[in-house]
Amino acid sequence: MKRTSYEIGLDAETLTVNYLVALGHRIIKQRWKSKFGEIDIISIKANELIFTEVKSRKNYSKEEVISHKQLKRNSLAALDFLGHFDVDEAVNNLQIRYDCIIVHRDNIVEHIENAWYIESCS
């Protein structure tokens, strides 16, 4: 039976969560939705609050993985999270990082740390 894109995406997110936990991340939210869009995974590691976009791709060029429009949406959603989510004082003092994880169809994980910055999305 052929799997849907949605099912493939959910599997990629599950694989990514397991990968991040193995790296020492503490997952605080998954599939967090705001009026601007959805953030796939929000985690904390050391002194960083990390917003992670997960992509599942068979073939791609890195420029095609996340469009400028999607970068802007994700950045606005992250700012919305920071403004509306009941974060404790410890979270307020963390550095913010935006990562992208590409899960290839053979379940190889490609982790791009600091994939973008808010300034690059204006």
Image (cartoon, rainbow, N blue to C red):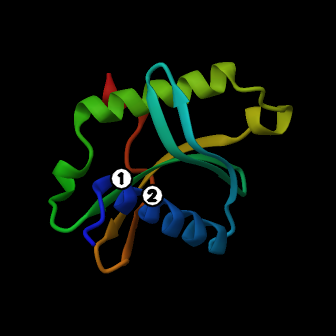
Comparing 54 with 113, the one in front is 54
Q: Position of residue 42 (x, y in %)?
A: 60, 46
Name the side, left or right, on which 25 lies relative to 61. right
Name the side, left or right, on which 103 lies relative to 95. left
| The quadrant where residue 49 appears | top right
Q: Position of residue 60 (x, y in %)?
A: 16, 61
Query: Is disc 2 placed on a helix, strand or loop?
Result: helix
| The quadrant where residue 58 appears | bottom left
Q: Position of residue 38 (x, y in %)?
A: 47, 35
From the image, which quarter does the C terminus lie in? top left
As drawn, 20 above or below 75? below
Q: Which mark is residue 82?
A: none
CA gap, disc 2 and disc 1: 6 Å
Q: Amino acid at mark 2?
A: Leu
Comparing 65 with 3, the one in front is 3
Comparing 2 with 33, the one in front is 2
Identified at 49% across, 27% down, the residue is 77
Which residue is labeled 1 in the image?
6
Identified at 76% across, 38% down, the residue is 91
| Direction right: furthest residue | 89
**Would you say residue 101 is visible in this rendering?**
no
Identified at 38% across, 59% down, the residue is 7
Q: Which mark is residue 10?
A: 2
Identified at 84% across, 32% down, the residue is 89
Within-10-Å neighbours for mark 1: few <14, some 14–19, many 20+: few
Callout 2–callout 1 Cβ contact below 8 Å: yes
